[in-house]
Amino acid sequence: MKFSVADQSNGNTIHAYTDESVVVRGVTFSSSLVIMPDRIISDWRPDSFQALDEADFAALLELRPDLVVLGTGQQQRFPDPRLYRALIEAGIGIEIMTTPAACRTYNILTSEGRRVIGALLFS
């Protein structure tokens, strides 16, 4: 899906997405990534939902967001809560949804000036 013109004054926004990729500022990303208004980490370790582990969420914790939007691919799948327990204990919210929904939600929250992380998986 392609979005209309995005206001980049709030930082990185997702301009388009498919089942296998997202486009941010004209660059296509087709592997797992973490997107924030001021930074993109294009080499987020898990290459699939099944590969998620506690260390992946600990890395997100270090970035100190208010909220993590986890996109789990084309299906909404919930990781074991013990994997993201550190986020909850630190008072950081986590929302789990399909990757397309996560892209849309990330953009909305970014446009509101929220300290949000989009953690996106494609498989």
Image (cartoon, helix red, strand yellow):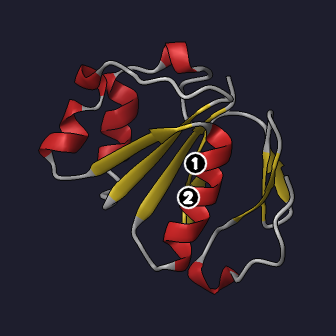
123 relative position to 89: left or right: right
Name the residue located 55 percent from the left edge and 28 percent from the top edge. Answer: 76
Tell me the SS state at disc 2.
helix
118 relative position to 2: left or right: left
Disc 2 residue crowd, few under 14, some 14–19, many 20+, Cα 10 Å: some
Q: Quadrant of the C terminus?
A: top right
Name the residue located 48 percent from the left edge and 79 percent from the top edge. Answer: 112
Disc 2 marks which amino acid?
Thr
Mark 1 = which residue? 102
Quick check: 73 above or below 60?
above
Disc ID at residue 44: none
- Please say whether residue 46 is visible from this viewpoint: yes
Q: Which residue lies furthest to the top in this view?
A: 50
Quick check: 121 above or below 109?
above
Name the residue located 85 percent from the left edge and 52 percent from the top edge. Answer: 1
Image spot of residue 116 (x, y percent): 43, 61
- Res 85 → quadrant: top left
Name the residue located 62 percent from the left edge and 22 percent from the top edge. Answer: 47
Disc 1 marks which amino acid?
Ala
Quick check: 121 above or below 28?
above
- Please say whether residue 43 is visible from this viewpoint: no
Q: Are marks 2 and 1 in contact (CB under 8 Å)?
A: yes
Image spot of residue 12 (x, y percent): 64, 68
Image spot of residue 40 (x, y percent): 60, 56
Disc ID at residue 105: 2
